[in-house]
Image (spheres, grey):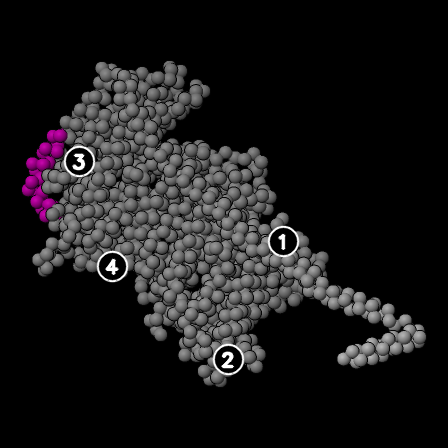
């Protein structure tokens, strides 16, 4: 299976290279090169899926690697790991990517950088597929950064706009914060286990080589990467801004695939997560799910609502994995990829039409603002119906894929809370977010598609349904929103149990739990700290108790979703509740939701200004203090030399001159006696002789 | 005459030849120096397949490759002794490559063309000689030979404050040289050749602790010697707080000289530490490894933060060099195989990446005649090819996977982490700042609304591409498949790490 996988991986890379160097010279800007690469990749992925389905083996796994880096005696392999999860991810990525490629042919038509857009899409597909196939953490990290790069390039695709360029930069840097934590986690793993291969790590943890607080630290550090990439609180701020990118990009990267990479990573690491790390993960996810949903309620930009909805849904997946509901979390990743991509592409179709209509009337109104829309159902029926189907899936309405996956997550958290009553908040987060989800999604649907068009009849005449190249992807994705695709062969509309998905991707046994359990048996001691065996049996345990919990969860979730839809309908369809009145009544709370709880502003004031201010202080320090010392010592040397020059001139040379002067003075004095007159000499002699005589007489 | 002598003195011969060429024919002068640097590159490249990667070198005279030894000043035991191992050979390749590419990058020099090229070729001799020398006296001579041409190249062909920058560079480096000279003399008078019993400058003899006598037995003397060498080499790296000559020198130096300065000369500092301080004074190295790690960490974070605040593009790149040389220090202080390999790989990769960065600054400076980051804006549509190459260099500098900087940075961290956890974690935070200032710079130069002053700037031309494409190809290839360079150094650097850490003593 590795050769076909290699083809899936490398075809988009080849397409990228061709597009960058020759794309502009090719007919149609070379879009067919990228399209061929990804659609053929999809075909091969489906072939792999078929093989996996025929094998129907939960433990299926194939690896292949080559020696990549050698230092000392250590050999780091670059390898690919293909198991059921990989194959499912391959299908999801190539499928969404393929339909987005197709959609972009219509959406990006006429863009001056049409070729470059497809080149970037291909590059993204390559990076994302590499991330999915990578067998060790360093390789995952490498592709992780590459998807970050492609995200940066595509968010800032319309870089003439400052907002787009800023959003790209913000996304990259925010992600880097998470990546730094992830890198530290990888280094911890490598230095304590001597391996970074996914299987090697699981084996090492199972053998008890890494455990306790260190394992929790590893789990949380690695999870930081996921917090960045899957935009969990507090690193969620980049994702809403990323909507500055073209809408197909939002659908592919910022809804369906890349942002799910964090969830994928947590799922991959699921077996080694310690209990404490799992709890942290669950709370981060649960809080994000609710937090983002509250913001989505108050947004007016169609893409922003969907962006916050994505945050919220990613939070669900993360919470599920943290709470031990592995299959449910990963299942939601897959179903969410389909309906959220469909929602984004649908919003793109709406924006496309709005833009066109507003341009015709010369209006500068915002084509993405829900308050400018209304009544689009009549003008864009196919967009409306596909959008509605995927909305129902997102809200968790029965018979839809989202119902199955969200319901499993809620059941999972409820089961977790019933075993650990201290964590009762997790299901509360989950159900509250589910209610809000149903509310904001139906608010969006009503505002955009029902009622009358709010930009005047003139603009309304120019509203058209999008071309079929954009509609076909919508139809494909909305078809995949029905439950049947995921629960064959049991075909049960209430639970994924019995379906191929749940069979092929069962919750794996915790490696840490095994080691811990073994250690407990041999030493008869209880290791301090929360131990996982409390949860480890839960997988089997819940198999019995799950039925009751599942039923309760299902009933509550149907109820809260219905409640959300009902309130939205009363507010925006039947007009029984006045949204404006409630906005005023909620006061501070509404302002908080509208202003995204001021998180961006807080970061600006603290992190951004703090860093920039600090760099200025350091630069001043560098220039004035450090370099000041250098220049100062040079100045000091010069002063010193001047002083010694003065001393040399006045002191040393002064002494020399003084000596000369002194000798000269003496010479001049003595010269007085050397007049050359013989009489005087005789006089001096006589005076001298007289003096001697007097002195001798006196003695 | 062996190949190492040839690559060392061929440029000097070229310098002499250039000096005799007619002054009024700059074309001839340029092509002559291009020929000589190309010849050096060809010879160095030809050595590549012959280089045996299994031989450690370092302190073992039998496993140095292409070595030549001849008595030079017998009265003082001074030899002409050259040879390469896994530590010096990558540096030789880097020097040969960058010097060759710098000649086309100097095509725009129009004043005193003859003097410029003669000095440049002399500089290449100095650098090559320093990298291949195995006799400390010979090393010192080449070290000083590098200094003088650099002083004139900055002082004559530099920017407005060139005299200040050149004198600062010269005096600062000279201070280091003086300290090195003192250490050199102390070592000379206390180390004896085991065969002849004479005092010797032979580095390999100095590395054998059995040959040490006299005051070298005193621990504090050895520590003093270590710090004497440290200051000498730290000035070159440059390590905080000896770094302030670098931004000034870079801002004033002409493009090609900046390339050499950052690409090769800075490596001379860390090379000196690895070649001389490490094996000659292993105990002091072990004792003060924490100090090297601390300084490396300061360099990484401090350099990155200072880079973020710069308004002059060239100064920004200069500070980024300070930051990136910090990785080398941090990694080499760990003595682990990954750290030692990472350090030298980072030296090589930083050499190619920073060369690209300075060449790219030169490209935009030649067109806009300023380097003020805020003074551009929206160049993406005016110079798309320039943006493409700049993106490769910037992302490589940021340590993005698929580009060579990633491998060496990760290797540095992998090596350093088990030994210096806290320092490594702080340094990893440096990569966030690095991404910050590089992306911000890209945005200010290329994105946003177009600056009306620069709507008709010509895109990067063929000559400039000729200098950049080879580097870009190397950066990409080594990012995907680092084996060709990593393999060169692995045996030697692993051996050196074990030697110093006591594993092989």
Q: Is residue A154 visible?
A: no
Residue A547 among those drawn in magenta:
yes
What residue is disc 4 on?
A: A193
CB of mark 2 within 8 Å of CB of mark 3?
no
Do the residues at discs 1 and 3 belong to one chain? no
Do the residues at discs 2 and 3 belong to one chain? no
Badge 4: few (under 14), some or many (20 or more) residues near its Cα, within 10 Å?
some
Query: Residue reaching furthest front?
Result: A698
What residue is disc 2 on?
A: B199
Q: Label 2, label 1: how many angstroms apart (C-alpha)?
A: 41 Å
Task: Tell me which label, 2 or 1, sits earlier in the chain.
Answer: 1
Q: Label 4, label 2: how many angstroms apart (C-alpha)?
A: 49 Å
Establish if A604 lies above or below B88: above
Query: Residue reaching furthest bottom?
Result: B196
The residue lying toward the viewer, choosing from A258 and A85, is A258
What residue is disc 1 on?
A: B163
CB of mark 1 within 8 Å of CB of mark 4?
no
Q: Nearer the viewer, mark 1 or mark 4?
A: 1
Q: Quadrant of residue B421?
A: bottom left
CB of mark 1 within 8 Å of CB of mark 3?
no
Q: Chain of mark 4?
A: A
What residue is disc 3 on?
A: A425
Badge 1: few (under 14), some or many (20 or more) residues near its Cα, within 10 Å?
some
């Amino acid at each position: 299976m590795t050769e076909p996988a290699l083809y899936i991986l490398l075809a988009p890379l080849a397409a990228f290279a061709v597009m960058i160097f020759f794309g502009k010279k090719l007919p149609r800007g070379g879009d067919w090169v990228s399209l061929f690469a990804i659609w053929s990749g999809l075909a091969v992925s489906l072939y792999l899926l078929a093989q996996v389905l025929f094998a129907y083996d939960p433990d299926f796994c194939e690896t292949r690697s080559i020696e990549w880096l050698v230092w000392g005696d250590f050999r780091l392999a670059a390898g690919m790991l293909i198991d059921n999860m990989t194959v499912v991810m391959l299908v999801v990525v190539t499928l969404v990517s393929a339909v987005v490629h197709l959609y972009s042919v219509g959406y990006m038509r006429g863009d001056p950088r049409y070729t470059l857009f497809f080149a970037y899409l291909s590059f993204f597909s390559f990076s994302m597929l590499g991330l999915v196939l990578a067998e060790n953490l360093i390789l995952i990290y490498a592709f992780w950064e590459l998807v970050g790069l492609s995200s940066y390039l595509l968010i800032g695709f319309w870089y003439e706009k400052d907002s787009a360029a800023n959003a790209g930069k913000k996304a990259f840097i925010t992600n880097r914060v998470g990546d730094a934590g992830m890198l530290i986690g990888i280094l911890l793993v490598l230095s304590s286990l001597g391996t970074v291969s996914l299987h090697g790590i699981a084996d090492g943890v199972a053998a008890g080589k890494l455990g306790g607080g260190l394992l929790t630290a590893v789990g949380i550090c690695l999870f930081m990467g996921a917090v960045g990439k899957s935009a969990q609180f507090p690193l969620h701020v980049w994702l809403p801004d990323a909507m500055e990118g073209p809408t197909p990009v939002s659908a592919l990267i910022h809804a369906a695939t890349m942002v799910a990479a964090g969830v994928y990573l947590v799922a991959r690491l699921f077996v080694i997560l310690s209990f404490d790390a799992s709890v942290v993960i669950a709370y981060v996810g649960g809080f994000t799910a609710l937090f983002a949903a509250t913001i989505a309620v108050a947004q007016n930009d169609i893409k922003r609502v969907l962006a916050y909805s994505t945050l919220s849904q990613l939070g669900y997946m993360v919470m599920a994995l943290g709470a031990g509901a592995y299959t449910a979390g990963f299942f939601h990743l897959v179903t969410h990829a389909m309906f959220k991509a469909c929602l984004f592409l649908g919003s793109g179709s709406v924006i496309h039409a709005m833009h066109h209509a507003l341009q015709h009337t010369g209006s500068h109104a915002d084509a993405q603002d829900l308050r400018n829309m209304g009544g689009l159902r009549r003008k864009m029926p196919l967009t409306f119906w596909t959008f509605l189907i995927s909305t129902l899936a997102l809200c968790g309405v029965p018979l839809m894929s989202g119902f199955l996956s969200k319901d499993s997550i809620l059941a999972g958290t409820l089961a977790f809370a019933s075993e650990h009553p201290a964590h009762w908040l997790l299901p509360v987060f989950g159900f509250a977010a589910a209610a809000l989800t149903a509310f904001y999604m139906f608010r969006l649907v009503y505002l955009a598609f029902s009622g009358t068009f709010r930009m005047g009849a003139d603009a309304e005449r120019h509203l058209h349904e999008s071309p079929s190249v954009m509609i076909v992807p919508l139809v494909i994705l909305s078809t995949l929103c029905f439950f049947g695709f995921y629960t064959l062969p049991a075909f049960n509309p209430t639970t994924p149990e019995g379906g191929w998905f749940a069979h092929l991707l069962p919750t794996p046994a915790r490696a840490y739990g095994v080691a811990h359990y073994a250690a407990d048996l041999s030493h008869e001691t209880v290791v301090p700290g929360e131990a996982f065996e409390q949860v480890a049996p839960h997988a089997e345990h819940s198999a019995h108790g799950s039925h009751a919990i599942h039923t309760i969860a299902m009933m509550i979730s149907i109820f809260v979703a219905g409640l959300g839809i009902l309130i939205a309908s009363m507010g925006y369809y039947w007009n029984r509740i006045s949204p404006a009145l409630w906005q005023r009544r909620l006061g501070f709370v509404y302002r908080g939701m509208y202003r995204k709880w001021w998180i961006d502003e807080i970061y600006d004031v603290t992190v951004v200004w703090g860093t920039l201010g600090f760099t200025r202080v350091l630069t001043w320090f560098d220039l004035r203090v450090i370099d000041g010392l250098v220049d100062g010592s040079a100045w000091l040397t010069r002063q010193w030399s001047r002083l010694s020059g003065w001393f040399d001139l006045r002191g040393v040379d002064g002494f020399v001159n003084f000596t000369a002067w002194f000798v000269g003075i003496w010479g001049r004095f003595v010269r007085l006696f050397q007049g050359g007159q013989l009489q005087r000499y005789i006089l001096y002699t006589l005076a001298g002789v007289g003096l001697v005589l007097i002195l001798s007489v006196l003695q | 005459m062996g190949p190492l002598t040839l690559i060392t003195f061929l440029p000097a011969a070229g310098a002499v030849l250039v000096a005799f060429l007619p002054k009024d024919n700059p074309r001839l002068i340029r092509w002559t120096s291009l020929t000589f640097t190309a010849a050096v590159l060809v010879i160095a490249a030809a050595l590549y397949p012959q280089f045996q990667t299994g031989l450690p070198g370092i302190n073992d005279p039998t496993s140095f490759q292409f070595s030549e030894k001849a008595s030079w000043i017998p009265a003082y035991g001074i030899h002409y002794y050259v040879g390469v191992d896994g530590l010096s050979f990558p540096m030789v390749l880097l020097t040969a490559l960058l010097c060759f590419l710098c000649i086309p990058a100097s095509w725009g020099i129009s004043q005193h063309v003859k003097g410029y090229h003669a000095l440049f070729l002399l500089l290449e001799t100095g650098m090559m000689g320093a990298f291949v020398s195995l006799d400390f006296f010979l090393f010192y001579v080449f070290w000083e030979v590098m200094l003088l041409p650099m002083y004139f190249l900055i002082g004559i062909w530099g920017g407005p404050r060139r005299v200040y920058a050149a004198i600062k560079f010269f005096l600062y480096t000279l201070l280091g040289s003086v300290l090195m000279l003192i250490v050199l003399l102390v070592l000379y008078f206390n180390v004896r050749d085991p065969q002849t019993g004479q005092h010797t400058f032979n580095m390999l003899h100095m590395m054998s602790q059995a040959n040490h006598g006299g005051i070298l037995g005193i621990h504090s003397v050895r520590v003093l010697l270590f710090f004497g060498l440290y200051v000498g080499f730290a000035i070159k790296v440059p390590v905080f707080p000896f770094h302030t000559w670098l931004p000034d020198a870079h801002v004033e130096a002409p493009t090609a000289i900046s390339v050499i300065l950052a690409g090769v000369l800075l490596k001379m500092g860390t090379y000196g530490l690895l070649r001389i301080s490490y094996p000659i004074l292993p105990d002091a190295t072990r004792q003060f490894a924490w100090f090297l790690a601390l300084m490396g960490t300061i360099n990484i974070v401090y350099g990155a933060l200072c880079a973020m605040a710069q308004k002059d593009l060239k100064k920004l790149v200069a500070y980024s060099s300070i930051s990136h040389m910090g990785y080398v220090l941090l990694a080499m202080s760990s003595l682990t195989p990954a750290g030692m390999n990472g350090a030298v790989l980072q030296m090589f990769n930083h050499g190619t990446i920073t060369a690209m960065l300075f060449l790219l600054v030169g490209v935009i400076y030649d067109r806009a005649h300023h380097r003020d980051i805020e003074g551009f804006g929206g160049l993406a549509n005016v110079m798309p090819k320039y943006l493409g190459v700049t993106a490769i260099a910037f992302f490589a500098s940021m340590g993005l996977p698929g580009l060579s900087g990633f491998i060496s940075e990760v290797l540095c961290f992998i090596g350093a982490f088990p030994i210096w956890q806290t320092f490594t974690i702080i340094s990893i935070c440096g990569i966030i700042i690095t991404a910050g200032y590089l992306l911000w710079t890209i945005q200010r130069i290329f994105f946003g609304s177009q600056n009306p002053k620069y709507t008709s700037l010509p895109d990067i031309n063929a000559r400039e591409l000729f200098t950049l494409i080879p580097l870009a190809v190397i950066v990409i290839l080594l990012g995907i498949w680092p084996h060709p360079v990593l393999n060169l150094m692995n045996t030697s650097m692993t051996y050196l790490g074990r030697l110093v850490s006591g594993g092989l003593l």
